[in-house]
Image (cartoon, rainbow, N blue to C red):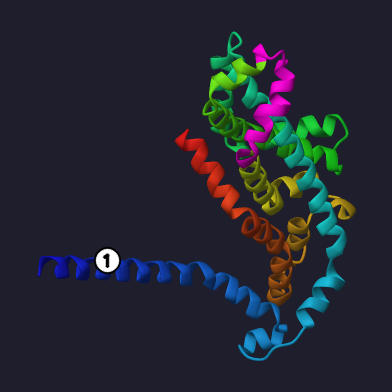
Amino acid sequence: MSMTTARLRRRVNRAGIFAILCLVGVVMLFPFVFMAITAFRSVDQYIAGSGFSLDSWTVLFNAIPVVQQLLNSTIVTGGAVLIILAVSSTAGYALSKLGFRGSSYLFLGVLAGMTVPMQSIIIPEFVNVSQVGLINQYLGAILVYAALGVPFATFLMTAYYRGIPNELVEASLMDGASFWQIFLRVMLPMGIPALVTVAVLQFIQVWDDLLIGLLFLQSPNVRTITVGLATLQSSRMVDVPALMAGSIISALPAIVVYLIFQRNLVAGLTMGVNK
């Protein structure tokens, strides 16, 4: 009788958890469903709440150069992610395995960099970038995004590399390998889960950002897709269906990247913490 009661309780608990997850899923997916439905309506159909058409897509592609802005976003995001991966992987290796003097203080500095709000440094960054003539240049935005993303990425790579046994480094040194060779042949291949985690997180962060793009990429020919969508708004009226259509285009790359690498993302975060 007790076993039957225990099984019944487990089933009830599972059913309760499943119901809660379904409720959370509905809440999370509702904005995307609304966005998809609205994107295939004209303004009049949106106001009336019925009907479907492709007028919003025509308005969107006539209002902004969608393909060019997607290309701009790809260039800026790809460049920033590559710099973040290069800096964080080498810095994480140095902080975790080389044991040089002052490494602990440098790591504390990295942690301190994670606590600085972006809004508090964005104006000094704008002044510095403008003084070197990189406003409205891909490189200016790429460097700012990289500077903001490196602290967290370095922290994650350092935590991950610390979980790799020091005996591997010592054995490689005894075999005559240099520290650079150890990084390229041992640490870098073993750090792929963490690198994928950093790449996915930073890709989503940079791709979806608006503030930096709005400040550092003001020229129409270098605007990212998020900045381009912001220009759809006028002082009197917002074309909601066209904005939703653009939001779908903007959100798809980040969603696709996450869905493709979600297992690597979870593995990288979990292994980095457990180790």
Instruction: Kindly give the residue lying farthest to the top in the view shown.
Output: 101
For the point 56% across and 70% down, which residue is it? Answer: 31
Front-most of 133 and 265?
265
Q: Is residue 52 magenta?
A: no
Give the vertical position of 31 relative to 257 (above or below). Answer: below
Front-most of 54 and 200?
200
Q: Main secondary structure of the magenta part?
A: helix
Front-most of 197 and 267?
267
Give the vertical position of 103 relative to 8 (above or below). Answer: above
| Residue designated by label 1 | 13
Q: Give the residues in magenta.
A: 173-194
For the point 87% across and 42% down, which residue is it? Answer: 137
Q: Position of residue 99 (x, y in %)?
A: 58, 13
Identified by mark 1, the residue type is Asn
For the point 37% across and 69% down, which residue is it? Answer: 18
**Is residue 135 at all visible to an observer of this figure?**
no
Q: Position of residue 160 (x, y in %)?
A: 55, 32
Q: Quadrant of the N terminus?
A: bottom left
Give the vertical position of 101 relative to 50 (above or below). Answer: above
Determine whether, in the image, residue 24 is placed left or right of residue 232: left
Callout 1: helix, strand or loop?
Answer: helix
Q: Position of residue 71 (x, y in %)?
A: 84, 55
Q: Position of residue 157 (x, y in %)?
A: 60, 32
Instruction: Kindly give the residue lying farthest to the front in the view shown.
Output: 175
**Is residue 101 at all visible to an observer of this figure?**
yes
